[in-house]
Image: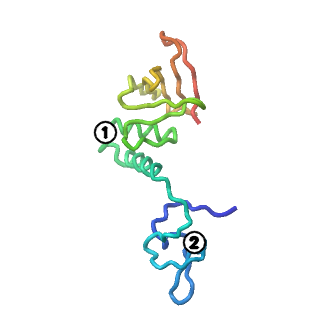
Amino acid sequence: MAPKIVKIVNSCSECPNYGYLSGGRHECRLVGHMVLDNAVVAPFCPLADYPSQMIANMQTTILGLRKPLEYGFGLALLTHVAAKLKLNLRTNRSGIMIPFNKDCEVYLGLDYIRGIEVNPFEITFVGSRGSLFKLSPDADPPLLRERIDFAGNTWRHHQLH
């Protein structure tokens, strides 16, 4: 099995495929080309570009985890849920898409939340489809329930992950 790149490479000097030849020359071992400036990524670099949307989503999630007080309770709440469900916040920090079944995702945004229970931790929200949902992100495995009848007596359960 070939080794995989596990970090973002910002210059040839950071890449494990960057190698020294003789006489102060360097090359990319993947393609056998000379590297003239190791402080940048060479234009012939064969590594796949890192998906920019994924980076943006991860940066939003990481920012919320590192500085939740600076970004308010709402972002801290959504960041906690995203981390528990192994999802990323949208770059506009307004919410997350939660997979409900193979054909459907449910949007959880701050303005959709109708209630929060503390023990056990459960969020009641109106989903993007207009249905009422209850999310238990700390359950093992996390649980998302959709209210089926108007009286609230019947719920469809969906375990996440």
Task: Name the residue type under label 2.
Answer: Asn
Q: Quadrant of residue 154?
A: top right
Q: Position of residue 34 (x, y in %)?
A: 53, 79
Vertical placement of residue 115 versus 13, above or below: above
Q: What amino acid is labelled 1 in the image?
A: Gly
Residue of label 1: 72
Q: Position of residue 6 (x, y in %)?
A: 55, 60
Q: Residues within 10 Å of mark 1 (few under 14, many from 20)?
A: few
**Residue situated in front as seen by the camera: 43 or 102:** 43
Task: Name the colouring of the figure.
Answer: rainbow
Indicate left or right for 97 with 2 as reference: left
Residue extending farthest to the front is 44
If the image is split into quadrants, where does the N terminus sit?
Answer: bottom right
Out of 119 and 76, give the one closest to the viewer: 76
Question: Which of the 4 image quarters holds residue 121?
Answer: top left
Q: Residue at x 44, y 36 (%)?
A: 96
Q: Pointer 2: what residue? A: 17
How would you rate the neighbour count of disc 2 (Cα within 10 Å): few for under 14, some for 14-19, many for 20 or more? some
Q: Which mark is residue 117?
A: none
Residue 135 in picture, x, y percent from top left: 48, 28
Q: Would you say the residues marked 1 and 2 are in contact, meaning their CB atoms lie under 8 Å apart?
A: no
First of labels 1, 2 by sequence position: 2
User: Going by the image, does 89 lie left or right of 30?
Assistant: left
